[in-house]
Amino acid sequence: MPFASDAAMAQFAVTAVEGRTTASAKARALYDALTGVIRDGRLVPDRDNAPKERTPLTAEGLWARVKGKGDAPLAGCYELTILYIAMARAVGLDARGAEPQSVQGTGAIGHVLVAVEHGDGGRSIVDLQNQAFGRGPPVRLLSDAELTAHHYNHLAVASYLRGDVDAAAASLAAATAIADTLPQVASNAATLAARQGDTAAAVAHARRAVTLAPNAAVYRYQLGHALIDAGALCAGLAALREALHRQPGYPEARALSRATLEAHPKLTCAAPGDAP
């Protein structure tokens, strides 16, 4: 479990929340303690959410690096989130993974946050990456299975960027087996299938990503790309049109639409209907 806590992490959390009695006060105190670690230079938030070759750390692995004698570790939003969750749960807080309802970035990994439920209907959103606490954007709570699947998705992305396609495929399969509800995993499976030349599988995975996140322009674009690669030009252009409808001016969708039409000047498609 990537967000497991060890004795050293639990002791840090216990000390951080000492004297606090409410869930909101404990959540804030733990946040302040961890941002203190960041200010001290012992932990460096990676504020670039682009996919990375760097292998993601578990919460225990990250804390071991923080407490070690080497350079301060660089940690992305997911690693910072699971570190907080591991410590928060060690002191009895109802801390869960969460993600913004609107998909951000390339759609390959996404942005992950912490939601701490207060038990009285209140909630604190914790974003250690951007050092924000309190209210936040509308979020979707993640199950523990989904939060774990995110770890394997990050592993897959790192392996893929390093050129290890087999390891990427194994991690994506693990992520899907744990929780098949993350559009990021389906989208990355589409990318992997396309690289392997399996256009039919790429389309199927891309459709799954659209089903899981129908309002995300990035997955409509990726579906359009997969369909065009598979030779379904009109369906692909329709998907790109839907991406542009959701995100007007989407440069990649505009460029691919233009390139497809220029490459097939005699192409005739039926009148626009519902998006694929």
Image: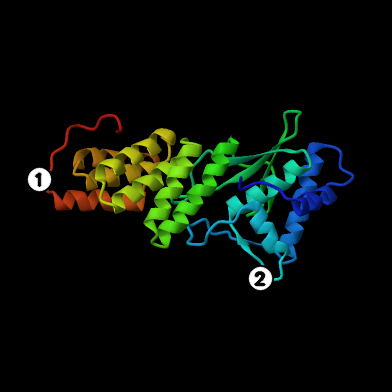
Of 195 and 139, the residue lying toward us: 195
Quadrant including the C terminus: top left
Taking 222 as reference, is 150 left or right?
A: right
Q: Residues within 10 Å of mark 1 (few under 14, many from 20)?
A: few
Tag 2 and tag 1, C-beta contact below 8 Å: no
Q: Looking at the rendering, which quadrant does residue 270 occupy?
A: top left
Between circles 2 and 1, the one closer to the viewer is 2
Residue at the spot of label 1: 266
Amino acid type assigned to the residue bearing label 2 in the image: Asp
| Residue found at the very far left of the displayed protein | 266
In the picture as drawn, the residue positioned furthest to the right comes out as 19
* Residue 66, visible in the rendered structure: yes
- Identify the residue at horizontal 38%, vertical 54% (top origin): 166
Earlier sequence position, callout 2 versus callout 1: 2
Q: Is residue 168 left or right of residue 24?
A: left
Front-most of residues 145 and 23? 145
Task: Name the quadrant containing residue 93.
Answer: top right
Q: Which residue is mark 2?
A: 71
How far apart are the alpha carbons under marks 2 and 1?
59 Å
Q: What amino acid type is highlighted by mark number 1?
A: Lys
